Amino acid sequence: MASITMENLGKVYPDGTRAVGGINLHIEDGEFLVLVGPSGCGKSTVLRMIAGLESITEGTLKIGDRVVNDVPPKDRDIAMVFQNYALYPHMTVYDNMAFGLKLRKFPKDEIDARVKAAAEILEIKDFLHRKPRALSGGQRQRVAMGRAIVREPAAFLMDEPLSNLDAKLRVQMRAELERLHSRLGTTTVYVTHDQVEAMTLGDRVAVLRAVSPRAPYNLQQVGPPTELFNRPGNLFVAGFIGSPAMNMTYGHLEAEGDRVYAVLPTGRLRVDPVALADHPGIEDHMNKELVIGVRPNNMEAAQVAGRDPERMITATITWAECVGREPYSPL
């Protein structure tokens, strides 16, 4: 296992297009870090730079204590798991998992031991003599992970490995990945556009956005999932993390005695004293225009909330979205 360190990491293509800008990030040995962001934000490019599949044009990349900017992919001691499984259709599960070790001239008995141990961990030992076409999507993804596990790498790099699976199977495979990481403890960098995956899998989550003249850096915030949800670092993170998304509007804060109110276009709300205590220095922003955000899970119908006039605003429900136990009602 090994840590991964990015120091001012950047990628500019020959035509001048910048894909990655100024990423500074340290991934601890044994950590499960998720790179999440919308399409085009550079997360897969960063993963490919770690793997050595994309050249690094700016900054430094370290795996452990070794600078690997110019080290070939095969010598970086990493293993990748892809979205499309990348299995050889003419080979059995056993041969797919063993193929990389055979190329590296491992002894047959060690190959056999590693393949069977990985198959045991992933619960695919009964499928070792089948070919990929005889397996379900979830089983194929387990084989792809098994092929990575047998290498016993310093780090796993996973590029949206669950995106081809149906919703129910994705939930199951997320649990499998958590169990696998707990058992192996291998440093893992996981790329996804799905914030649910990011929030449920990551020890820490790094939120990325596409670079632009106004936002030259991809990395917006990195931290534990609860920190990103409860204390977003900027408007992009606040709007991206959370489903349904945070409600945001312009307003300002005003004080009346020892109470503070958020004044919104639709009324005003008393700000919880606990929230004020969690944001030292907020008094410096009184009576200035602010963007005020309220999570949907912090809102409920007035008759349920007890009709406290200091905690009520008036709004019209435009439509309702039934997603099970809790209907979503945009205002």
Image (cartoon, grey):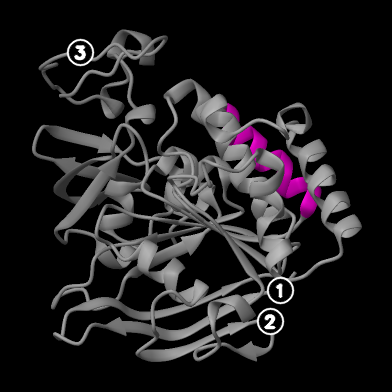
**Circle nearer the N terminus (3, 2):** 2
Q: For residue 177: magenta?
A: yes
Q: Secondary structure at mark 1?
A: loop
Q: Residue at x 73, y 35 (%)?
A: 128
Q: Which mark identifies residue 249?
A: none
| Farthest-out residue, right | 109
Number of numbered labels in the structure image: 3
| Callout 3 touching callout 2 (CB < 8 Å) | no
- The vertical placement of 50 against 41, above or below, is below
Question: In the rendered image, which quarter contains the C terminus?
Answer: top left
**Circle nearer the N terminus (2, 1):** 1
Q: Which mark identifies residue 64?
A: 2
Q: For residue 183: magenta?
A: yes
- The vertical placement of 163 against 55, above or below, is above
Q: Looking at the image, can residue 304 be seen? A: yes
Q: Residue at x 66, y 51 (%)?
A: 147
Q: Position of residue 83 (x, y in %)?
A: 44, 47
Q: Which residue is mark 3?
A: 320
Q: In the rendered structure, which segment of residues is drawn in magenta?
A: 172-184
Q: Which residue is more in the foreground, 181 or 326? A: 181
Q: Which residue is mark 1?
A: 2
Looking at the picture, which amino acid does disc 2 mark?
Answer: Gly
Alpha-carbon span between mark 2 and mark 1: 5 Å
Question: In the rendered image, which quarter contains the N terminus?
Answer: bottom right
Alpha-carbon span between mark 3 and mark 1: 48 Å
Q: Position of residue 293 (x, y in %)?
A: 27, 44
Looking at the picture, which amino acid does disc 1 mark?
Answer: Ala
| Callout 2 touching callout 1 (CB < 8 Å) | yes
